[in-house]
């Protein structure tokens, strides 16, 4: 496979980014897709690159690129391929319902501290994701290759709506929720960044409310999670909630020696939209064996008394963390 990718890589360019609108982004620095190519009848290759100095992805305490930045690059690859090659309208909203990813080789994420993080995504949309069926359930599987090494696999499914149908659905849904008992967010105290492996407090997405529950911080001024306005809490923010909640739970349970941990596997389900102005609580359950590096945390999100998302997050120690490397 790597030989074939080397041959195709020459046809993909890393010289400029696609138009921001194709990736559903507003800021140019938030676009990670550089080029696309068609291979065969139902596969696509996408050149992706993540900036070295990104305010979110470079906010880390270890010399490894963040695997979550690769997940975001794959998400954008789906959007670009959908519009550029599959006839999906530019204004068609998408709702991810299931997503899983696995880090196949953590060494592929090692930061040389000289080069940007870039690779090639091989994308295979499901049968329902081709042709004119953009408003049906769609599925995909993707791989990310970095320097000829298989770094990550990603799979998922969801729905892409026609704009008019989406607007009608959300208006009806939000109207019903307006009649429910209010669940306005209570005053919160954001967790210290060192508890979730961050430096910048802006990138902390968890807090404790007055009842000492873990709750989601929805900061609509965040330059990456809210690169543009949404009518719901965006998926990338919820993925970060899963990661930070898992790290907090595993550290508190003594399963992690430090919150500087690698996420190597995630299986997530999103069963409802997360509304912006209502409190989202977070519960966790951690199991694992620190000696075997088997650490899995179940993270559930609730809003309006209902579970809206569930994830199983597998964590591992970075090799440099175990060796006490100065890069930690």
Image (cartoon, rainbow, N blue to C red):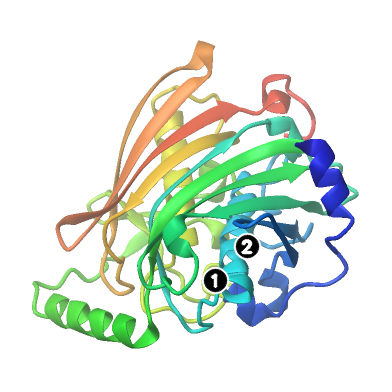
Q: Quadrant of the C terminus?
A: top right
Nearer to the camera, 265 or 298 = 265
Which residue is labeled 2 in the image? 77
Q: What element carries label 1?
A: loop
Q: For the residues carrying marks 1 and 2, which lies nearer the camera in this image?
A: 2
Nearer to the camera, 88 or 289 = 88
Rate crowding at label 2 as few (under 14), some (14 to 19) or many (20 or more) other CA atoms within 10 Å.
many
Nearer to the camera, 228 or 204 = 228
Point out residue 147 in the picture as x, y percentages from the top left corner.
83, 41
Whether residue 317 is situated above or below residue 169 in the rendered picture:
above
Which residue is labeled 1 in the image? 222
Does residue 71 appear anywhere in the picture? Answer: yes
What residue is rendered at 53% in x and 80% in y?
228
Q: In this view, does 123 lie to the left or right of 171?
A: right
Distance from Cα at disc 1 to Cα at disc 2: 22 Å
Point out residue 50 in the picture as x, y percentages from the top left corner.
74, 58
Q: Quadrant of the N terminus?
A: top right
Disc tally is 2
Looking at the rendered structure, which numbered label has been put on residue 176?
A: none
Q: Is mark 2 on a helix, strand or loop?
A: helix
Whether residue 278 is situated above or below residue 261 in the rendered picture:
below
Q: Quadrant of residue 3?
A: top right
Q: Is residue 66 left or right of residue 116?
A: left
């Amino acid at each position: 496979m790597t030989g074939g990718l080397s041959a195709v890589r020459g046809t993909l360019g890393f010289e400029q980014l696609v138009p921001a609108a194709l990736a559903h982004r507003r800021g140019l620095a938030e676009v990670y897709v550089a080029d696309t190519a068609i291979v065969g009848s139902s596969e696509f290759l996408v050149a992706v690159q993540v900036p070295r100095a990104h305010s979110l992805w470079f906010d880390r305490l270890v010399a490894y690129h963040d695997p979550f930045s690769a997940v975001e690059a794959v998400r954008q690859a789906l959007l670009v391929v959908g519009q550029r090659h599959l006839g999906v309208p530019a204004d068609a909203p998408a709702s991810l319902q299931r997503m899983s990813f696995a880090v196949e080789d953590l060494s592929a994420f090692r930061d040389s501290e000289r080069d940007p993080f870039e690779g090639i995504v091989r994308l295979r949309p499901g049968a329902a994701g081709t042709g004119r069926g953009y408003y049906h359930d769609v599925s995909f599987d993707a791989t990310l290759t970095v320097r000829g090494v298989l770094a990550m696999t990603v799979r998922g499914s969801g729905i892409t709506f026609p704009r008019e149908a989406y607007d009608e659905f959300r208006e009806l849904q939000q109207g019903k929720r307006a009649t429910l008992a209010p669940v306005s967010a209570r005053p919160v105290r954001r967790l210290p960044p060192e508890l979730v492996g961050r430096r910048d407090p802006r990138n902390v997405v968890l807090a404790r409310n007055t009842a000492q529950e873990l709750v989601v911080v929805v900061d609509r001024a965040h330059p990456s999670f809210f690169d543009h306005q949404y009518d719901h809490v965006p998926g990338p923010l919820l993925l970060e909630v899963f990661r930070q909640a898992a790290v907090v739970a595993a550290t508190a349970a003594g399963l992690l020696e430090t919150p500087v941990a690698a996420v190597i596997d995630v299986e997530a389900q999103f069963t409802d939209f997360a509304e912006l102005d209502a409190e989202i609580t977070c519960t966790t359950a951690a199991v694992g064996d620190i000696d075997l590096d088997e650490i899995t945390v179940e993270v559930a999100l609730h809003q309006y008394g209902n579970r809206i998302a569930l994830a199983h997050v597998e964590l591992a120690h970075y090799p440099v963390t175990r060796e006490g490397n100065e890069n930690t």
